Image (spheres, grey):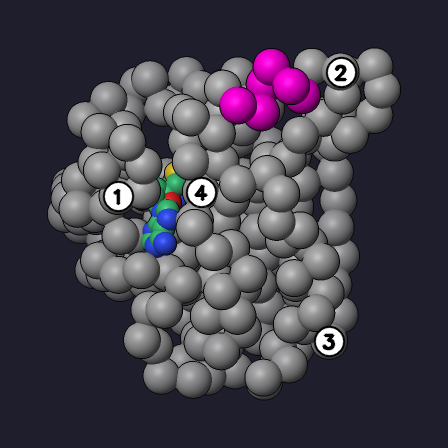
Amino acid sequence: MGGQRLYDRWSRNLPALRAMYALVFLGRGSTFRRRSVAALDVDRGERVLELGCGPGNSFGRLREAVGHEGVVVGVDYSEGMVRRARNRVDERGWENVHVVRADATRPGIAPGTFDAAYAAMSLSAMPDPEAAVGAAAAALREDGRFTVLDARPFQPLPLSLLNPLVVPLFARLTDWDHETDVPGAIRERFESATVRGDNAGTIYVASGSGPRC
Ligand SMILES: C[S@@+](CC[C@H](N)C(=O)[O-])C[C@H]1O[C@@H](n2cnc3c(N)ncnc32)[C@H](O)[C@@H]1O
C-alpha cells in the first residue's frame, strides 16, 4: 500500500504516527518544528502555504506567526488527513486557516499567491519531491521563502551502517523517498538557500528565498 491510502490509514491512527515522529526526532520534535517555522521568517499578515499538511500539526505555529490578519492554507492529498486537519481547524475556530485536498506537486495555485511556503516531514513522502519544490517556488511571490523540515538517512559513520535496516523500514511505513536531494532542489529553484542538519544528520531544515521561476 502507498500514497494516499497509506496516509488515509495513518489518519486513523494518529497516536502511532506521533510515536513514530518521536522516534525519528529523538524526542526533539517541538524543537525542530519551532526552529523550522522560525526559519520561514514569517511576518504578521502574511499568506503561508503548507504542502502535505497532514492532520495540521504545524497549523498552530504557522497561525501564531501570521497572526489573525494573515492566512494559512494547508494542502494534502489524503482524504483522511484532510478530514483530521479540518476537524482541528473547526475545533479551534481558526477562521484564517484553510485546508485544501490536492496533490502538492501540482496544486493549481496561481503564481505569486503566497509570501511563504512550508513542508514538514512531507516532501520525502511525495512521489516527486522535486516537483513539490517547483510547485512551492511557483506559488511564491518574488521574494518569497520556502522551508522544509524533513528526515534523511544517517550521514556519518558508524551510524550510517544502520541505514540498510532503517531505510527500508521507514520507506515501507511512510513512503519515504530518501534518495531525492531536496536541499539540492531548493538550491536550484531559489536564489539563496541554507541547510542545517541535526540528530546525526537525520533531521534537516532547508530554506530557500527568492524563487527562480
Ligand atoms: C508524514 S506526514 C506529515 C504530516 C505533517 N506535515 C506533519 O508535519 O505532521 C506526510 C503527509 O504528506 C502527505 N502527502 C504525501 N504526498 C503528497 C502529495 N503528493 N500531495 C499532497 N500531500 C501529500 C500525506 O498525505 C501526509 O499527510
Residue 136's disc is none
Kind of element beneath mark 3: strand
Label 1 – label 2 distance at C-alpha:
31 Å
How many C-alpha atoms fall within 10 Å of the one at disc 1: few (<14), some, or many (≥20)? some
Residue flagged by tag 3: what amino acid is it? Answer: Glu
Which residue: 85% across, 20% down?
A: 157
Q: Nearer the viewer, mark 4 or mark 3?
A: 4
Residue matched to label 1 = 4
Label 1 – label 3 distance at C-alpha:
32 Å
* Predominant secondary structure, magenta span: helix
| First of labels 4, 1 by sequence position | 1
Residue 165 colored in magenta in the image: yes
Kind of element beneath mark 4: helix
Residue flagged by tag 4: what amino acid is it? Answer: Ala
Kind of element beneath mark 1: helix
Label 4 – label 1 distance at C-alpha:
10 Å
Left-right relation of 118 to 206 = left
Q: Are marks 2 and 3 in contact (CB under 8 Å)?
A: no
* Beta carbon at label 4 within 8 Å of ligand 1: yes
Residue matched to label 3 = 191
Residue flagged by tag 2: what amino acid is it? Answer: Leu
Residue matched to label 2 = 161
Q: Quadrant of residue 41?
A: bottom right
Whether residue 115 can be seen here: no
Query: In the rendered view of the protein, which quadrant contains the N terminus?
Result: top left
Kind of element beneath mark 2: helix
Whether residue 140 can be seen here: yes
Task: Give coordinates of residue 99: x percent, y percent.
Answer: 24, 57
Which residue: 43% across, 50% down?
A: 127
Above or below, 147 against 16 in this view is below
Report the span colored magenta: 163-168
